[in-house]
Image (cartoon, rainbow, N blue to C red):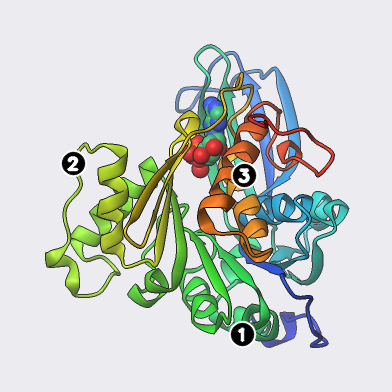
């Protein structure tokens, strides 16, 4: 990010137990048609909608709705879409003082859905998110250092992720989605590393190939079809202090120290699974920042994730403190 594009930041203390999310902010543009078009084909669609998204922003909304003081570090463009992109975060009470407005487009996810088979295609143009690099993160070192929990995902430049993890003074929650080649040191700071099954396999492949993960790869196991517990065990080779493997309707597996614990998700009628993982991560961060143990935090996060799949949308499907979560006593 160029020097003149940086916002003027007045350093100030942040509250104890603050969640800081350094990550992506997008506009999700969703169109539906009876089926997906073939290459070169134009189809008349059936609906179009615009909603704020981006994994970072989704997770910030989820953490704030769980009651955590939450600060977002990221960037939007000056293309007229910036207010829409941060609107739900603002309404949820996320502190947006560290969101820069930079020249160029806001991050855009173009989602096409074919209604006949629910297949989709997604093109993400990072736009402003691509400028959240090491220098941009350093401009907010004060909050990154002071965060009780720093939440990172894979939708900003890897240099930004690595710098943020290095600066963190508190706990680092690394949601490696999508998987990217972060430094070994970043993986070692993760407590927990959170991935779904697909991401787990991609990460293990990457580690086995030695891509971006140091020279110890020869000792690391290549992935095959594994049971969930074996997959969580294999992920320990990534070096993270703890692991949370999410399993959709199957809940999550937690690996911490010598413990390997499966946490079941409540059974619900799924309406829209988009955003479940982000609701899970945001809730996990809020619980950890409030002092919960990892296992207790995951027990609540699976209920938050299950709630999210019962609602349409991504940010809008995260529960507030007024919502009744499934799986209660
Ligand atoms: P992602 O969205 O990142 O792929 P998952 O699909 O694993 O992540 O979902 C994250 C969490 O959301 C799960 O651990 C689970 O608690 C909850 N969840 C997701 N899908 C369902 C479902 N169909 N039924 C109940 N809970 C679900």
Residue identifier under label 1: 138
Q: Point out residue 114 in the picture as x, y percentages from the top left corner.
A: 55, 20
Of badges 3 and 1, the one in the foreground is 3
State which tag comes first along the sequence, 1 or 2.
Answer: 1
Q: Quadrant of residue 243?
A: bottom left
State which tag comes first along the sequence, 3 or 1.
Answer: 1
Residue identifier under label 2: 224
Residue at coordinates 26% horizontally, 65% vertically from top-left?
A: 211
Q: Is mark 1 within 8 Å of ligand 1?
A: no
Task: Using the numbered discs, state the Cα–Cα distance from disc 1 to disc 2 in whole angstroms.
Answer: 39 Å
Secondary structure, mark 3, is helix
Q: Is residue 106 left or right of residue 110?
A: right
Task: Using the numbered discs, state the Cα–Cα distance from disc 3 to disc 2 in whole angstroms.
Answer: 30 Å
Residue 263 drawn above or below residue 92: above
Q: Is residue 321 left or right of residue 273?
A: right
Which of the pair 147/180 is nearer the observer? 147
Residue at coordinates 61% horizontally, 59% vertically from top-left?
A: 292
Q: Is residue 196 left or right of residue 230?
A: right
The answer to whether mark 1 and mark 2 are in CB contact below 8 A is: no
């Amino acid at each position: 990010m160029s020097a003149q594009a940086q916002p003027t930041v007045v350093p100030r203390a942040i509250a104890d137990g603050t969640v800081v999310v350094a990550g992506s902010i997008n506009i999700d543009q969703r169109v539906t048609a009876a089926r997906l078009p073939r290459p070169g084909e134009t189809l008349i669609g059936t609906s179009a909608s615009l909603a704020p998204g981006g994994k970072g922003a989704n997770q910030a909304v989820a953490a704030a709705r769980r009651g955590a003081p939450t600060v977002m570090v990221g960037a939007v463009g000056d293309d007229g879409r910036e207010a829409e992109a941060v609107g739900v975060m603002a309404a949820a009470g996320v502190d947006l003082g560290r969101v820069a407005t930079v020249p160029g487009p806001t991050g855009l996810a173009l989602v096409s859905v074919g209604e006949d088979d629910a297949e989709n295609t997604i093109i993400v143009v990072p736009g402003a998110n691509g400028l959240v690099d090491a220098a941009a993160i350093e401009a907010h070192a004060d909050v990154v250092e002071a965060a009780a929990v720093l939440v990172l995902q894979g939708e900003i430049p890897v240099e930004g992720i690595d710098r943020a993890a290095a600066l963190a003074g508190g706990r680092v929650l690394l949601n490696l989605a999508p998987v990217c080649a972060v430094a070994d040191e970043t993986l070692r700071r993760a407590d927990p590393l959170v991935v779904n099954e697909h991401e787990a396999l991609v990460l293990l492949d990457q580690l086995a190939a030695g891509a971006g993960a140091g020279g110890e790869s020869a000792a690391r196991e290549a992935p095959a079809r594994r049971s969930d517990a074996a997959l969580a065990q294999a992920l320990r080779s990534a070096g993270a202090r703890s692991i949370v493997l999410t399993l959709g309707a199957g809940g999550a597996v937690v690996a911490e120290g010598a413990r390997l614990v499966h946490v079941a998700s409540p059974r619900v009628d799924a309406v829209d699974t988009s955003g479940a993982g982000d609701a899970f991560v945001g809730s996990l961060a809020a619980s950890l920042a409030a002092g919960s143990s990892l296992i207790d935090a995951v027990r609540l996060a699976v209920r938050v994730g299950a709630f999210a799949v019962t609602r349409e949308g991504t940010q809008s499907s995260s529960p507030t403190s007024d919502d009744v979560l499934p799986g209660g006593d």
